[in-house]
Image (cartoon, grey):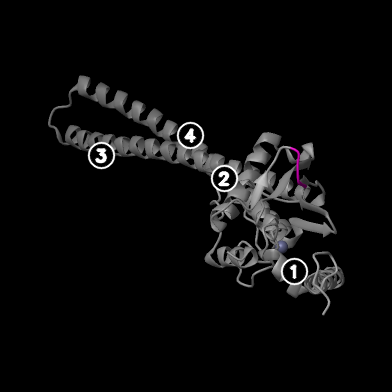
Amino acid sequence: MPQCTAGYFNHNNLYLINIMMRTLLIILTLCIGWLLFGESPAVKKLTDKLPFGHCSRPLVFHLGGLDSRFELDAGHAEAILQEAAEKWNRAAGKEILKFDAAKGFPVNFVFDQRQQSMMALKRSVANLNEMRLQLEFKKQVLQQEIDVYEERRNDYQQEVTDFNSQVSAFNRAYQHDDAEAGRLRYQADSLKIKQANLNDQHSQLDTQKFQLQMDADTFNQMVQQHNQQYGGEQEFTQRGVYKQNGSDKRVEIYQFNDDNDLLLVAVHELGHALGLEHLPAEHNIMSASHNYSVEENSTEPQLTADDVAAVKAVCRL
Ligand SMILES: [Zn+2]
């Protein structure tokens, strides 16, 4: 019976080598499988659960190009982009987006016809608002002048009534007092002057009323023109875009009205960068279409319950 000697090639060692070879083969098969099917959804789902998967590390971005024609300060734009990222971070309960001065993918402000027409629209709205205020002011001033005129006319009519009764009394008197006759004649002249003044004032007020009506007509025509020119609705997708080509990612922002509107566009496009698709209901920030707002002091956009659920689903939170 052969003696089992200590050495590398006894039966026990051969068994160990067999196990090691099998293990290596399994690892090799897994590696080849990984390379071949690594992009498949099933594998992706698995890798997303690993420490370096989706949302496990914040998606870093920075402010890229900012065309000066947007008339937007870079620091201000950065603050709005950071606020947009914070909205998603608060929804996720962790940092999934991170603003950095220079790292990550860029958010570029690209100026073209869209923002140009938006700015023309804003100027038109501002112009109409200014005109409306001026018209209201002129109307108030005219109304005050009319009130003063009517007070004076009432006083005058009261004076005429008093004067007529004094004249009647004078005529009924048995003896005519010359001094009283002189006083009445003087008062009659004074009343004539007052009446002429009141007539002048009345025609001036008529002219002012006519002028104001002309201004109001011009204003109404301008409002109609404005509505014809800018009345159409704008698709949200025209206002910004998230582009990804392999590892090359970027957000482009084309059109916004004010800070809250820019925040809305930024939150929407950063949502795409996180991997969110469009949501059907229009009230969601991730809806494909949003009408833009031209009202000043528009309200700050807020993520809806559906938006929050969508980011949690994408990040598997
Ligand atoms: Zn979109």
Instruction: Please state which amino acid type lies under the numbered disc 1.
Output: Lys
Q: Position of residue 126 (x, y in %)?
A: 63, 43
Q: Nearer the viewer, residue 80 or 120?
A: 80
Q: Which residue is mark 2?
A: 132
The CA distance from mark 3 to mark 1 is 100 Å
Total numbered circles: 4
The residue positioned farthest toward the front in the image shown: 1
At a point 74% along the width and 55% down the height, the residue shown is 240
The residue positioned farthest toward the left in the image shown: 174
Instruction: Please state which amino acid type lies under the numbered disc 4.
Output: Asp
Q: Which quadrant contains ligand 1?
A: bottom right
Q: Position of residue 165 (x, y in %)?
A: 21, 37
Q: Which residue is mark 4?
A: 200
- Label 3 vs label 4, nearer the camera: 4
- Label 3 vs label 2, nearer the camera: 2
Task: Determine the secondary structure under disc 4.
Answer: helix
The span picked out in magenta is 102-106
- Label 1 vs label 4, nearer the camera: 1
Question: Which of the 4 image quadrants contains residue 159?
Answer: top left
Q: Which residue is mark 1?
A: 44
Residue 98 visible in rendering: yes
Task: Determine the secondary structure under disc 3.
Answer: helix
Q: Which mark is residue 161?
A: 3
